[in-house]
Amino acid sequence: MVRASEEDREAIRESVRKICAEFPDSYWREVDKTFAYPQAFVDALTKSGYLAALIPEEYGGAGLGIMEAAIILEEINRSPGNGLACHAQMYTMGTLLRHGSEAQKRRYLPKIATGELRLQAFAVTEPDAGSETTRLQTRAVRSGDKYVINGQKIFISRAKQSDLMLLLARTTPYDALKNKTEGLSVFLIDMRSIGGRLDIKPLEMMFNHHTNILFFEDVEIPVDSLIGEEGKGFRYIIDGWNAERILVASEAIGDGRWFVDRAAKYASERVVFGKPIGANQGVQFPIARSYAHVEAAGLMRDTAAAKFDRGEKCGAEANMAKLLASEAAWEAANACLDAHGGYGFAREYDVERKFRETRLYSTAPINNNLVLAFLGQNVLGMPKSY
Ligand SMILES: Cc1cc2nc3c(=O)[nH]c(=O)nc-3n(C[C@H](O)[C@H](O)[C@H](O)COP(=O)(O)OP(=O)(O)OC[C@H]3O[C@@H](n4cnc5c(N)ncnc54)[C@H](O)[C@@H]3O)c2cc1C
């Protein structure tokens, strides 16, 4: 991994800001209104190399650490934009790097780095298995030199904007397992060349997120699509959770800073009863309070990312960062909406769009209840609820 200095990090921030400045409010408003995919933005980010931040240099990436990836996503969300359009590549990279074979890395990573191949879909959730991942039912059955997949996945984002999909599927029936965390396997599927039938049906969501329901009907994939060992997939996915928590926290921090900046500016300019509304403590204090909370979450994120990059245990910090950042972003979103009065609801002010977008971080990729359960049970040692 390339060890970035503070100056390097500032340079990355500045550079991502410059790219984002080419995609103003009006671009994201239009994309949101038409439910379009922000292809031009994703292309610019790919071309800059920042989307390949976590791919090692030997495979054509930038070889940076989680702290730099966090800064990149934070700056995207601090702009009018949103990293949701393309963050999966960063979220899932650890699984491929840690558990993929050398042949898989050589085959895919250089092409992902250049954008020739898109790894933007990560399929875990099912209609009857959300938080309780070990209950998932989509089956992958070995048949000669192939696996045959049948089942359903729900809320799978960007499946239509991706060539590759990381899939968690069951290779041993639940009832046949002694240890219920085994029996799941991770596959890297090239959706351009599968046998059988994969139907991808878009879902209408609260905001522009390209989320789908997937139906697998005798989908055939080559055996070398398996990542690591069969049956160890849940373990591999868990290994990626700290990175994911840190990256989600960073997107929320970016949103939080956007809300605070917009709220403070508007509250300083809008005059009601002969003075700027921000002079009233009823308007000023919620903005100041959410600012403090966003910045505190930022410090927790920094601690988590630093530990992660040093290879130290960071489950507690990564989970706390995700919890604090998603709550702080939501608090800032409400303060910003309140400060804008009725204009907060008008599309042309962009507050309502970001408001809808930032609510996600409390719920997905993992609900804050389960983050609290991790802290309560695994860090503080209290009894388990599940
Ligand atoms: C916009 C969007 C995009 C998504 N993209 C993807 C994607 O690309 N890939 C993917 O695999 N998934 C994706 N998801 C799914 C997301 O990860 C799940 O929604 C999430 O894991 C929760 O699962 P669930 O919705 O089934 O909730 P459930 O598991 O049904 O839980 C419902 C509620 O009960 C709470 N709860 C459950 N058990 C407990 C307990 N023991 N203690 C306290 N509270 C509990 C939960 O915290 C939650 O609040 C996406 C979701 C959304 C909304």
Image: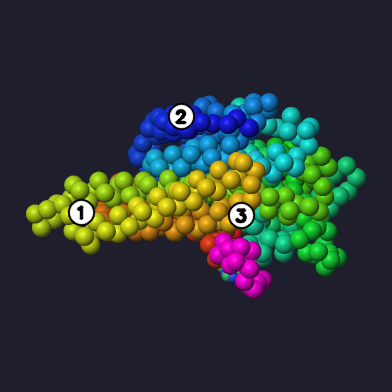
Of helix, strand and loop, which one carries label 2?
helix
Name the secondary structure under disc 3: helix
Residue furthest out toward the left: 274
Q: Which of label 3 and label 1 is nearer to you?
A: 3
Is tag 2's residue or tag 3's residue first in the polypeptide sequence?
2
- Residue type at mark 3: give it: Gly
Residue assigned mark 2 = 7
Residue neighbourhood size for the residue with mark 2, other residues' Cα within 10 Å, grouped as few (<14), some (14–19), many (≥20): few
Q: Which residues are magenta?
A: 370-386
**In what element is the residue under mark 1?**
helix
The image shows residue 88 at horizontal and vertical percentages of 59, 43
Measuring 53% from the left and 36% from the top, which residue is drawn there?
A: 68
Mark linked to residue 98 = none
149 relative position to 244: left or right: right
Amino acid at circle 1? Gly
CA–CA distance in space, label 2 to label 3: 28 Å
Q: Tell me whether circle 1 and circle 2 mark residues in contact (CB < 8 Å).
A: no
